[in-house]
Image (cartoon, helix red, strand yellow):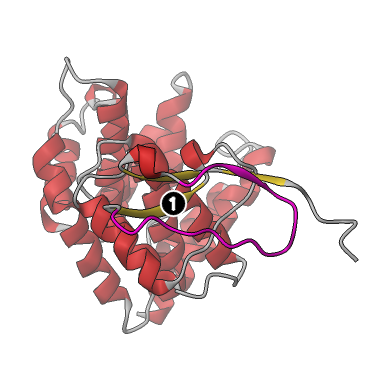
């Protein structure tokens, strides 16, 4: 019966570190560990995320872990490991505490400067956003995101700095992406102002912020913006990165009129290569279907 069980090395994280239970090899379906009584941090399994397994916890245990994160008693690598595990379990329908517990964990770690953690956060919230579009809960999620990124905006600022690390630059991109998705007023005004000030030459925009600025332009939905972006797209043969950014912006304009124009563009091989047609059509139809629900 137990011939197919894997032997799994188990180790722990707790505080103080010398109170960690001893690592062991899990050889059976069940194993009981006696936890120290006077530790500050609840036990977290899989130190540094080095083990090839995912871990789930009870709601009560998660509350203790979230408190420890809020008190800066858990390293960002450990938080990243927790978030990876919980998102994987949730998408598989095997995370009993539910998405709310993941949002609590994210809220507890909002002061982090780890770009990978912000990237995973953005991916999960984007996944939730797609499921809540045009529902009564979409506004609640937007409010949550705006509150989540407020301290991060103060910490990182909205504008790249020459002296900052790649980690800071990456974290800001993820934070601004969340702000663009949730229509955060400050983020949208900042990105639209960047676009409006650089329409003569979009290559002046910092690569980190150009795509986000163009996305905000598409959400603004003005016909004059669509025409300008289309003209720029037609003229940007030599700048592949700019052309890709413009293509994404054009295909995310919402409305039947824009959808018809985008579908017509795909018929011209000079404008849309055959390998890119599926992407153009998919993004266009998604934007069109959203607008019809409004």
The one of 211 and 291 positioned closer to us in this rendering: 211
Compare residues 143 and 286 and report the one nearer the observer. 143
Q: Quadrant of residue 269?
A: top right
What predominant SS class does the magenta segment belong to? loop
Mark 1, Cα crowd under 10 Å, few <14 / some 14-19 / many 20+, is many
Whether residue 229 can be seen here? yes
Examine the rendered structure and indicate whether residue 209 appears above or below residue 289.
above
**Left or right of 213 in this view: 29:** right
Q: Residue at x 75, y 52 (%)?
A: 27
Res 228 seen here: no
Read off the magenta span. Answer: 21-38
Residue 149: give x, y in percent of width and height. 19, 52
Where is residue 293 drawn, in percent x and y? 41, 80
286 sits left or right of 246 in the view: right
Residue in the image at 37% along x and 72% along y: 60
Quarter-of-image position of residue 268: top right
Which quarter of the figure is the C terminus placed in?
A: bottom left
- Determine whether the residue tagged by mark 1 lies in a helix, strand or loop: strand
Q: Does the magenta stretch include residue 42?
A: no
Residue closer to the observer: 27 or 206: 27
Q: Which residue is drawn at 45% across and 42% down?
A: 247
**Place of residue 250 in the rendered image (x, y in percent of width and height, measured from the top left):** 41, 48
The residue beneath circle 1 is 44
Give the residue displayed 52% in from the left and 63% down from the top: 56
- Number of numbered discs present? 1
């Amino acid at each position: 019966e137990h011939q197919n069980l894997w032997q799994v090395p188990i180790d722990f994280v707790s505080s103080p570190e010398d109170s960690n239970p001893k690592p062991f090899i899990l050889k059976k379906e069940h194993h009981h560990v006696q936890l120290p009584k006077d530790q500050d941090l609840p036990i977290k399994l899989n130190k540094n995320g080095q083990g090839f397994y995912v871990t789930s916890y009870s709601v009560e245990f998660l509350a203790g872990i979230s408190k420890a994160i809020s008190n800066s008693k858990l390293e960002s690598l450990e938080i990243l490991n927790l978030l990876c595990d919980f998102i994987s379990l949730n998408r598989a329908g095997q995370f009993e505490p539910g998405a709310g517990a993941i949002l609590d964990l994210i809220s507890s770690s909002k002061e982090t400067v780890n770009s990978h953690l912000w990237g995973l956060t953005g991916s999960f919230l984007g996944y939730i956003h797609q499921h809540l579009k045009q529902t009564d809960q979409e506004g609640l999620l937007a409010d949550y995101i705006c509150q989540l990124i407020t301290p991060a905006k103060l910490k990182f600022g909205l504008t790249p700095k020459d002296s900052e690390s790649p980690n800071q630059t990456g974290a800001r991109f993820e934070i601004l992406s969340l702000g663009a998705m949730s229509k955060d007023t400050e983020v949208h005004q900042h990105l639209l102002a960047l676009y409006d000030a650089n329409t003569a030459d979009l290559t002046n925009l910092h690569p980190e912020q150009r795509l986000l600025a163009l996305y905000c332009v598409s959400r603004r939905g003005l016909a004059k913006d669509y025409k300008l972006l289309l003209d720029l797209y037609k003229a940007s043969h030599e700048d592949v990165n700019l052309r890709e950014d413009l293509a994404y912006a054009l295909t995310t304009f919402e409305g039947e009129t824009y959808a018809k124009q985008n579908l017509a563009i795909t018929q011209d091989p000079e404008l849309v290569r055959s390998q890119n047609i599926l992407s153009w059509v998919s993004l266009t139809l998604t934007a069109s279907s959203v607008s019809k629900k409004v």
